[in-house]
Image (cartoon, helix red, strand yellow):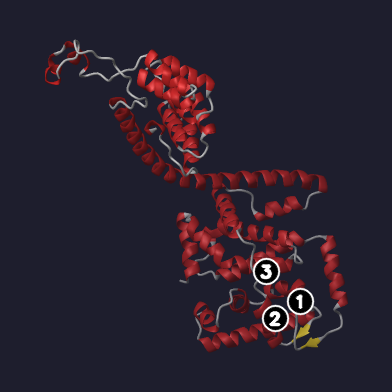
Amino acid sequence: MTESQRLLAEYAQSGSEAAFREIVTRYLDLTYSTAIRLVDGDAHLAQDVTQLVFIDLARMACTLSREVMLGGWLHRHCCFVARKVMRGERRRASRERQALEMNALRDDSQVSLSEIAPILDDAIDQLGTQDRAAIVLRFFEQRDFRSVGEVLGIPENAARMRVNRALEKLGKLLKRQGIACSAAALGTALATEAAASAPVGMAVTITGAAVASAATGTATTLTILKIMSLTKLQLGVAALVIAGAATTILIQHQSQLKLREQSEYLQKQIAQLQADNKNLSSRVTQLKRVPAPRLPAPAIPTTASTAAPVENLQFTNLYARFKDKQPQLTAEQVEPYLKSNRRNAASLLAAYRTSGDAALLAEAMQKFPNDPQVAFEAAFKKDSSPEERLQWLNALKKSDPENSLPDYLSALDYFKAGQTDQAVRELISASGKKQFHDYSLG
């Protein structure tokens, strides 16, 4: 069993998308090259024919013989599909004109593939199974004679002779159509021009469409081709229906792939979020425990009569009252500091943190709503509602757009509220930002 046959069997048994993608990658150029010749060089139509061929392969994989030579099957089926697509009075008339123009037989030592392209694949399709397989393996799959022999089960020299005989038979078929050329010239033309590279990204698109089509049991190629033979008005309506169905299938398949990737990515992000949340909670706890006054300590007037010796300080009622409490500054004590700093955002927040006066935070929120530190402090205000917290987290996002912290905080709130979709969007947004600025550290 060849590698291609093994991949086809794997896809037929388990529906492995990876196996089918490898098949498409291996035979895409072969099929596309055949299609573009059959459709008179129309690249867009060639892509459509190629996609239909691989859709049929995905649908018929379970019914094909395990000994099938995949290159030959794809070439023959491509011919079948292309003939159906190209069937029409205008294109038949065009080919008849080409045949009339070439009625004078020529025997050139050099022949261009463009001269024989309109009839080449039909002629190949008329060859016997072994001869057709030899042509496809040698010139379309671009294998050497040893590889051709391995696939056909014959020695290398026998494979060389098989290819030469197939070229002679192909030359005779072309001669009936008005083109005379030697087997050597025909072999040179096929070896240099037969395989064309498919557009970049086409393998991924075809794989997704074919696998999705096989999984959902969509219309067969013949059904689609019958629709294409309807009147212009019917064709327009049918095209919209087919385009809509194909788009829906492709979008569903791509969405499944994206969701699978996002699921793995989000598991990592959630773990990171939990670690960041734990770290942030630890920092907030430390901030609450350790006073961080940003003002110079106010001078406290003392007199000799009231001053107590240091060694006796532990016995005073004042020490007993404040030994387990954080010192708080009064409004009168912070007012000179605020005036000297013109009550800017930083001074209002410092005064609020050292005095605990909520009015100072309210003033900062009113005067400096676009300051990121003010927005951060407002988001953690004790009496704020979930709506207010969300408002200030959004304000923090706008004022510090490259900081991922507000996105992580919003995601955490959404997870707690059971709103998973919104939480996922916040995590995705956070993953695209490079900074993580924790304003609890100043």
Q: Quadrant of residue 98?
A: bottom right
Relative image position of residue 371 (x, y in whole percent): 51, 29
The disc placed on residue 302 is none
The residue identified by callout 2 is: 189
Label 2: few (<14), some or many (≥20) within 10 Å?
Answer: some
The disc labelled 3 sits on which kind of residue?
Answer: Thr
The residue identified by callout 1 is: 116
The C terminus, quarter of image = top left
Q: CA distance from mark 2 to mark 3?
A: 14 Å
The disc labelled 1 sits on which kind of residue?
Answer: Ile
The residue identified by callout 3 is: 34
The disc labelled 2 sits on which kind of residue?
Answer: Ala
Tell me if label 1 and label 2 are in contact, CB under 8 Å. yes
Q: CA distance from mark 3 to mark 1?
A: 12 Å
Secondary structure at numbered mark 2: helix
* The residue positioned farthest toward the front in the image shown: 304
Q: Is residue 391 visible?
A: yes
424 vs 4, nearest the viewer? 424
Relative image position of residue 104 (x, y in whole percent): 87, 83
Label 1: few (<14), some or many (≥20) within 10 Å?
Answer: some
Q: Earlier in the sequence, mark 3 or mark 1?
A: 3
Task: Kindly identify the residue that appears in the image at 28 percent across and 19 percent down.
Answer: 327
